[in-house]
Image (cartoon, rainbow, N blue to C red):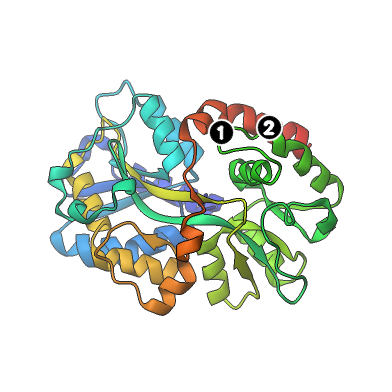
Amino acid sequence: MAFMINRRTALGGAAALAAFPAAAQDNKRIVVGTWGGDYSRLLAKHIETPLLVPKGWDVVKDEANDPPRRAKVLAEKSLRRGTSDLQGVSAANMYEMNDQGTLEQLDYSKMPNAANLIPAMKYPYGIGHIYSGKVVLYNPKMMEAPKGFADTLDPKQGNKLGIIDIQYQYTMLAASLASGGSMGDFEPGKERLIACKKAGARIYPSNEAFAQALKTEEIACGIMWKARAVQWQNAGINVQTVAAAEGVPMYVSGFVMPKNAPNKAGGYAYLDAMMAPSAQEGFAVDMGYNPTVSNAKVPPDVQKRIGFTEEEQKRLKDLDYGYMAKNDAAFQEWWNKSFKG
């Protein structure tokens, strides 16, 4: 997902936290670390305002991209009380944070709505909130439909191929699958990506910048979560999706609770509200991500656009979280120095 925020939003979130020092923590206040932008807005629309505020909960957001938020949780590991009750991160980063020993092992008996949670979204240390799959995006006006990652991440696309900087892990994974690699071996895709860069592929700093390039037809294709493509379709961008022949890597975004969360009761209340059918249905309609609970009723026309056919579901691939966590620093170094540099 990797939602982006601007400096003003980040400073606003920091100011909000400063206004509520830890020593004055109220037992009805829940501090939620999350991305800004659409995701934060929809958390308020579908979870906080309708389900938590009426019960007297006061939700304070600490908005930032996930690397600094994860770093802060790790830095606070030795403190008796941390500064956040929940953190929104990807499933891959959930794994890494748990491996660092910073996360509470969840008591699912405290969350009635967890009875309907899809088993694959139930982690000992976190809960999947929404999920989608990495697919090919293309403008049907500018090119024929690609079959998968191989003919999308291809030097022949020249400067009509767009690549998103913050999606480096998933771009490396897609390139690897296109080059004979696997979920646990990204090496085969590196040569392909460098060839694409040399051929003129454009690199965009954020999902939003990539969307703008699609809108203006500066680029014709790229890879992204299907859910984002649905959002952009809703916004009038001429983009279609293809579930790649090589497989559809899954993306799961969810929440974890730091071991030293100051208000664990509030954290559990938030997690339970997050799994309510109404909240899950709202995210499906507004953001294009699939629900993680079995009792959410998504309108058929929406489900057709955000979901995957029975045949496509057979190509869904879960990530190798251990491999990604172990090698993330090396991935970033290669991406920044060898690919971008």
- Using the rendered image of the protein, determine whether residue 69 is visible from the camera's viewpoint: no
Please state which amino acid type lies under the numbered disc 2: Glu
Residue at label 2? Answer: 187
Residue 255's place in the image compared with 148, above or below, is: above
Q: Quadrant of the C terminus?
A: top right
Which one is nearer the viewer's eye here, 59 or 99? 99
| Residue 278 image offset from top left, x and y in percent | 26, 68
Numbered disc 2: secondary structure: helix
- Mark 1, other Cα within 10 Å: few <14 / some 14–19 / many ≥20: some
Residue at label 1? Answer: 184
Residue 299 in which image quadrant:
bottom left
| Residue 253 image offset from top left, x and y in percent | 41, 49
Please tell me which residue is depicted at 53% across the width and 33% down the height of the picture: 324
Which one is nearer the viewer's eye here, 28 or 228? 228
Q: Is residue 37 left or right of residue 278?
A: right
Numbered disc 1: secondary structure: loop
Please tell me which residue is depicted at 74% across the width and 77% down the height of the picture: 141
| Residue 123 image offset from top left, x and y in percent | 31, 40
